[in-house]
């Protein structure tokens, strides 16, 4: 009888240990650390007119990504590349200034983005651009790190969707919080 009770108690302890959450936190994929979203400055955009695309990066709490101006040559900078369709002239991406932070794995402060970063791309719609719904494919590349681990670099597809109109008669500014004038 004592043996059966001992086996039952041992089995209950094993089941309780299995049911406990893991002591070590799950390491996310680099793809799950940054959530990018693209926004346009006017809608609809007009032929022969400039507009901007803002790509807002929401960075998971406890992680950072290297700024575009990485602190060292061996660090992978955050970059945004546009693959513009015919009818659109793309400008140079404007990257925010990073913040210098020191982490447990280095004594040298690193130039990083944390929490949120906004990248901006100026675009001019050319006279022959197709009217109607358009998509501008973007490629975001970054490397995410925490205090304990750096994840492999990733490249994410980001889609900037907008409508092209023949003229600016119906165009209006949108997302003013992202495109405030200096």
Image (cartoon, helix red, strand yellow):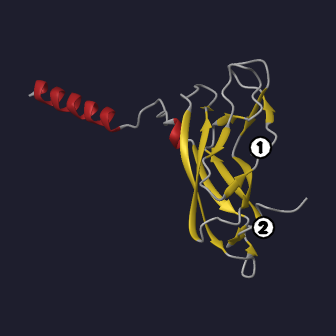
- 1 sits left or right of 44 in the view: left
Residue 95's label in the rendered image is 1
Looking at the image, residue 174 lies above or below residue 14: below
Residue 91, position as x, y percentages in the image = 76, 49
Query: Callout 1: few (<14), some (14-19), or many (20+) C-alpha neighbours within 10 Å?
Result: some
Name the image quarter holding the N terminus.
Answer: top left
Callout 2: SS: loop
Residue 30, position as x, y percentages in the image = 53, 36
Q: Residue furthest front?
A: 128
- 138 sits left or right of 8 in the view: right
Callout 1: SS: loop
Q: Tell me whether circle 2 and circle 1 mark residues in contact (CB < 8 Å).
A: no
Identify the residue shown where x is 67% and y is 57%.
Answer: 88
Residue 85, position as x, y percentages in the image = 59, 54
Could you say which is closer to the camera, residue 28 or residue 81? 81
Identify the residue shown where x is 91% and y is 58%.
Answer: 182
Looking at the image, residue 23 lies above or below residue 180: above
Please identify the quarter of the rendering in which residue 177 is found: bottom right
Identify the residue shown where x is 79% and y is 44%.
Answer: 96
Looking at the image, residue 121 lies above or below residue 156: below
- 1 sits left or right of 51 in the view: left
Identify the residue shown where x is 68% and y is 76%.
Answer: 166
Residue 176's label in the rendered image is 2
Please identify the quarter of the rendering in which residue 68 is found: top right
């Amino acid at each position: 009888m004592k043996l059966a009770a001992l086996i039952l108690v041992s089995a209950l302890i094993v089941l309780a240990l299995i049911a406990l959450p893991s002591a070590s936190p799950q390491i996310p994929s680099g793809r799950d650390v940054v959530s990018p979203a693209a926004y346009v400055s006017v809608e609809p955009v007009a032929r022969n007119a400039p507009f901007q695309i803002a790509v807002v990066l929401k960075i998971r709490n406890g992680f950072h990504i290297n700024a575009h101006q990485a602190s060292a040559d061996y660090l992978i900078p955050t970059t945004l590349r546009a693959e513009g369709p015919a009818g659109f002239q793309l400008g140079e991406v404007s990257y925010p200034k990073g913040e210098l932070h020191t982490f447990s794995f280095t004594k040298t402060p690193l130039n990083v983005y944390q929490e949120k970063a906004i990248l901006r791309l100026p675009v001019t719609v050319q006279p022959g651009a197709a009217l109607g719904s358009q998509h501008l494919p973007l490629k975001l590349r970054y490397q995410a790190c925490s205090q304990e681990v750096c994840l492999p670099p990733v490249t994410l597809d980001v889609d900037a969707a907008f409508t092209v109109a023949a003229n600016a008669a119906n165009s209006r500014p949108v997302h003013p919080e992202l495109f405030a004038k200096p």
